[in-house]
Amino acid sequence: MAAHLSYGRVNLNVLREAVRRELREFLDKCAGSKAIVWDEYLTGPFGLIAQYSLLKEHEVEKMFTLKGSRLPPADVKNIIFFVRPRLELMDIIAENVLSEDRRSPARDFHILFVPRRSLLCEQRLKDQGVLGSFIHREEYSLDLIPFDGDLLSMESESAFKECYLENDQTSLYHAAKGLMTLQALYGTIPQIFGKGECARQVANMMIRMKREFTGSQNSIFPVFDTLLLLDRNVDLLTPLATQLTYEGLIDEIYGIQNSYVKLPPEKFAPKKQGESGKDLPTEAKKLQLNSAEELYAEIRDKNFNAVGSVLSKKAKIISAAFEERHNAKTVGEIKQFVSQLPHMQAARGSLANHTSIAELIKDITTSEDFFDKLTVEQEFMSGIDTDKVNNYIEDCIAQKHPLIKILRLVCLQSVCNSGLKQKVLDYYKREILQTYGYEHMLTLNNLEQAGLLRPQMGGRNNYLFSDLCKVIKIINVLRLDLNS
């Protein structure tokens, strides 16, 4: 059991156990030894619900990443493909199956679509002549994945693009389906509120799904009082601005994937090893970040400026705890100290890791460029010079900074200014295309379609973000203490 999933007000281990049970049932259908061939994108999410030990209990002996040509040799009876319903993946699977058919002995093939079965994909397998090779063709509804005691994720990175660019409502269906699963486990949510067209569609899908299951009444007392559905485009500003919490900055700088982060190894080398400069580790340091770690749970949501004092205080507490060994005189006192030792050593290791991470982040946040970028963001959110070309953005383009950084700033300016003047927008577009390549014409067009980058339109309802801040008195909340 993942203990950290039960720390919050809702025990999310119930959801985790439900999806694990469904996985075990499918594996048991494939009697005999097994090899799993993974769609690489799924390995991270599955790692949060089913470690290798669970798979091994159900006779999974080998695991491979889905690639073209022949599969690696494996002395197993069953080969199971865990894949998303993507047509390009079906072509690779067909190639794998056809190459295996030439081998002996014959294998049993199975395919598990995550999170849904696709008729188009099955037709593609049929066209390739391999559909009949699969004994089981099923779907695994992994709609909501428990990440932490207070966090569920669909891990659908393309959902915004699908909804607002491609007019594809599939991700909304999965959101509704996942919420219905949640209600089946935790009771019917009595109140649902939402804002935005997509939120309305999800709510309507949930109502329709509820009608389809009118025969089965949910007798579980509701754990959740209210469900609040919000479209992403209700607040486009938040994902564009730089995150300033401890966890947020880790994600900004290094990227957190499926609760894991990979960090430069040099800060984590033992002191003597680091001082000598010889044999320094070259492989990235991989750490899991969740509330199971007491220190991380305490500092993850703090502004980064407040993290140093917490780490310093924690270091003094741990140091004092280790000093207690000198006061242990009796056998009972020594025994008590020894019983606390594993927890103390874990706390010291956790402190060392987060001190190293904080040092890595500080190297970035104390740089002049980071300060300048943050200053520009604050100026935009305060309504300062949002209607003209920004000098900092110009300089960044000239120095060919990462394109994602440029686009975030330009889009932030657009959102805060309720669009950009046509000549300002045209200037940014021209500079970006000439510097980064004309292939990004499609990128800029997509940003416009999504509402992130647009020309300013005249009219009485064309409010600036800064004006709205003044009306509802939140401008002081947005001001950042850049000098601390």
Image: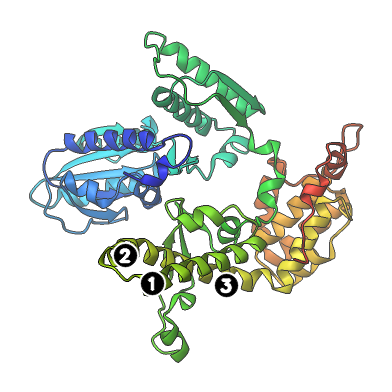
Quadrant of the rendered structure where residue 204 is? top right
Badge 2, how many Cα within 10 Å: few under 14, some, many 20+? Answer: some
Q: Amino acid at mark 3?
A: Glu
The percent coordinates of residue 183 (x first, y second) are: 44, 24
Spatial separation of the CA atoms under disc 1 and disc 3: 34 Å
Residue 333's tag is 2
Q: Amino acid at mark 2?
A: Glu
Query: Residue, x 91% and y 33% (percent of image)?
Result: 459
The percent coordinates of residue 180 (x first, y second) are: 45, 24
Circles 1, 2 touching at the beta carbon (< 8 Å): yes
Quadrant of the rendered structure where residue 359 is? bottom right
Residue 359's tag is 3
Helix, strand, or loop for circle 1? helix
Badge 1, how many Cα within 10 Å: few under 14, some, many 20+? Answer: few
Mark 2 or mark 3, earlier in chain: 2
Q: Quadrant of the N terminus?
A: top left
Q: Where does label 1 land, which residue?
A: 327
Spatial separation of the CA atoms under disc 2 and disc 3: 37 Å
Q: Is residue 104 above or below residue 180?
A: below
Query: Residue, x 56% and y 56% (percent of image)?
Result: 299
